[in-house]
Image (cartoon, rainbow, N blue to C red):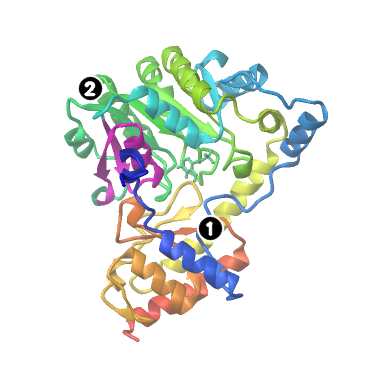
C-alpha cells in the first residue's frame, strides 16, 4: 500500500522535545510534584479591557465572518500602534490580521517563497521557523550566532547569502536567547537585505517585554527596508492572549494583498470576537502590560542571579527581552544520572526531570545542543523551588555524584 502521507507531511520533523514533554505530563498525571519551567506563554490573565471587548462582541452579535484581513477599526488601530510605538509608516490597508503571529509568519513565507528559495535564520531560533520554511517549499539556512554571543555578525550572515536567498527571518527580541538587537545590528541586516535584494520577516512578538535595552523595529530604519520588511507582531505575549489567537503582519501593499488572498483560501478572517477583544486591548489602559513586564523583569533577575554561581552553568550575557533564559549546560555532559547517559540537551532535560522533577526545554530544537531553555513565565515561588532543585542537580553532576 502506498503511504497515506505526502512528501510534505513526511518531511515534518517530529519535535525533539516530545519525549521530555510527554514524560513530564505523565508524571504530573501520576500526581508527581513537577516544577514546570517550559511555559511559552505569560502566566497572567488577559487584561480586563480585552476580556470585556470579547464579551461585548458576543453580546452585540459580532459573530459573523469578517473581512479576511480584519475589521477596519482593528486594522486602523494596529496601523496607529505601529506608527506611534515603532515609527513605522504603515497604513491600515497594509495590515493583515491573522490567527496568531504564527499564521502571519506562515502567510508571509507562503507568498514570498518559490520552491528552493533559501531563508537565512540566525540561530538559536524559535523552533517553528525552519519547519515553516520547509512547508512553504523553501530551504532554511541556519547561521549560528553562538560564536558571537548571540549577536548578529555581518560576516557570518553575508557568508550565508547565495543567489537563492530570498528572505532573512529576524526574531527581535529573541526566543530563546532573549537578545534584543541593537541599532547597529539592525542597520547591518537592513544593508544586507537592500544590497542583496532580500526580504525580511521581522517577528516582533516579544516587543513589549524588554528590560532596559531599546527595542527598534528594523522597518523603521528607512524607506528601503520598510518596503522589504514584513513586520509581524501579535497579542499573545504583550496582552497575555495566547488562547485568543490574534496576530498581524504589515507589509508593502503587494505583499499584504497576497497574504490576504492566501489567507482567504485557508482560514478566512480571524475570529470576530477575538478581533473586538484585540481592539479593546489596544484602546484600553496599557498599565497591565507594564505591570506584567515589571514582574517578568524581577523574575529574570532572580533566575539569572541563581544560575550564575551554579557549577557548570553559564550565561553568555544577560537576556534583555522575552521571558526565557538560555543557559549553557554542556560542561555537565558526560555523566550518568537515573540510568540516563547525559550526552546532550535532550538527555540533560530528561535526567533533570527524573532526578529533580524540574521540566525545561532542551536547546537542540532551537539549534543548540549545548543549552537548555528556562521560562520564567511562572510565579517567583515556583522559580525559587525550581532553582533550588536545579542547583542541587547541577551540584550533584559537578561533584560526580
Ligand atoms: C518567536 C515567536 N514567534 C511567534 C510565536 C507565536 O505567537 P502566536 O501565539 O501569536 O501565534 C511564538 C510563540 O511562542 C514565538 O515564541
Magenta part of the chain: 118-146
Q: Tell me, for residue 250, which label it has, or none.
A: none
Instruction: Report if the beta carbon of the residue with label 2 is closer than 8 angstroms to ligand 1.
Output: no
Q: How many marks?
A: 2
Residue 288 within the segment the image draws in magenta: no
Local packing at callout 2 (Cα closer than 10 Å; few below 14, some 14-19, many 20+) is some
Q: For numbered disc 2, what is the local secondary structure?
A: loop
Q: Is residue 96 left or right of residue 130?
A: right
In this view, the residue in front, 318 or 395, is 395
Q: Which mark is residue 376?
A: 1
Q: Residue at x 43, y 67 (%)?
A: 307
- Return the residue at label 2: 196
Relative to residue 330, is residue 86 depicted above or below? above
Residue at coordinates 53% horizontally, 63% vertically from top-left? 302
Q: Is residue 171 above or below residue 377?
A: above
Mark 1 and mark 2 lie on one chain; the one further toward the N terminus is 2
Q: CA–CA distance between discs 1 and 2?
A: 39 Å
x, y (%) of residue 209? Answer: 54, 44
Regarding residue 309, the answer to whether it shows in the image is no
Ligand 1 within 8 Å of disc 1? The answer is no
Q: Quick check: 144 left or right of 176? A: left
Name the quadrant of the C terminus: bottom left
Identity of the residue drawn at 36% across and 46% down:
125
Q: Give the x, y percent position of residue 368.
A: 30, 55
Please identify the quarter of the rendering in which residue 29 is found.
Answer: bottom right
Q: Is residue 212 above or below residue 227?
A: below
Amino acid at each position: 500500500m502506498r503511504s497515506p502521507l505526502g512528501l510534505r507531511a513526511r518531511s515534518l520533523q517530529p519535535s525533539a522535545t516530545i519525549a521530555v514533554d510527554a514524560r513530564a505530563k505523565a508524571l504530573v498525571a501520576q500526581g508527581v510534584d513537577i516544577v514546570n519551567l517550559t511555559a511559552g506563554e505569560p502566566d497572567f490573565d488577559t487584561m480586563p479591557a480585552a476580556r470585556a471587548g470579547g464579551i461585548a462582541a458576543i453580546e452585540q452579535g459580532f459573530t459573523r465572518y469578517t473581512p479576511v484581513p480584519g475589521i477596519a477599526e482593528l486594522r486602523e488601530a494596529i496601523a496607529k500602534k505601529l506608527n506611534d510605538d515603532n515609527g513605522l509608516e504603515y497604513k491600515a490597508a497594509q495590515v493583515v490580521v491573522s490567527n496568531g503571529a504564527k499564521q502571519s509568519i506562515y502567510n508571509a513565507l507562503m507568498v514570498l517563497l518559490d520552491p528552493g528559495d533559501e531563508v537565512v535564520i540566525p540561530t538559536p531560533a524559535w523552533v517553528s521557523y525552519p519547519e515553516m520554511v520547509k512547508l512553504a517549499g523553501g530551504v532554511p539556512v541556519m547561521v549560528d550566532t553562538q560564536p558571537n554571543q548571540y549577536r548578529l555578525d555581518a560576516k557570518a550572515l553575508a557568508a550565508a547569502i547565495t543567489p537563492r536567498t530570498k528572505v532573512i527571518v529576524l526574531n527581535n527580541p529573541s526566543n530563546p536567547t532573549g537578545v534584543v538587537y541593537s541599532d547597529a545590528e539592525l542597520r547591518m541586516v537592513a544593508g544586507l537585505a537592500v544590497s542583496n535584494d532580500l526580504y525580511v520577516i521581522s517577528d516582533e512578538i516579544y516587543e513589549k517585554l524588554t528590560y532596559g535595552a531599546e527595542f527598534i523595529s528594523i522597518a523603521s530604519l528607512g524607506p528601503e527596508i520598510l518596503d522589504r520588511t514584513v513586520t509581524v507582531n501579535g497579542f499573545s505575549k504583550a496582552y497575555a492572549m495566547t488562547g485568543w489567537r490574534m496576530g498581524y503582519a504589515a507589509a508593502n501593499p503587494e505583499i499584504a494583498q497576497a497574504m490576504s488572498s492566501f489567507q482567504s483560501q485557508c482560514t478566512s478572517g480571524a475570529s470576530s470576537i477575538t478581533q473586538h477583544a484585540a481592539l479593546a486591548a489596544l484602546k484600553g489602559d496599557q498599565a497591565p502590560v507594564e505591570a506584567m513586564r515589571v514582574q517578568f523583569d524581577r523574575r529574570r533577575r532572580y533566575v539569572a542571579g541563581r544560575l550564575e554561581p551554579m557549577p557548570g552553568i553559564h550565561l553568555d550575557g544577560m537576556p534583555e527581552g522575552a521571558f526565557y533564559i538560555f543557559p549553557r549546560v554542556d560542561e555537565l555532559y558526560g555523566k550518568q544520572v537515573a540510568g540516563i547517559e547525559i550526552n546532550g540537551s535532550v538527555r540533560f532535560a530528561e535526567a533533570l526531570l527524573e532526578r529533580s522533577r524540574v521540566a525545561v526545554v532542551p536547546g537542540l530544537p532551537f539549534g543548540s545542543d549545548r543549552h537548555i531553555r528556562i521560562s520564567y513565565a511562572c510565579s517567583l515561588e515556583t522559580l525559587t523551588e525550581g532553582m533550588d532543585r536545579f542547583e542541587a542537580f547541577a551540584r550533584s553532576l559537578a561533584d560526580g555524584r
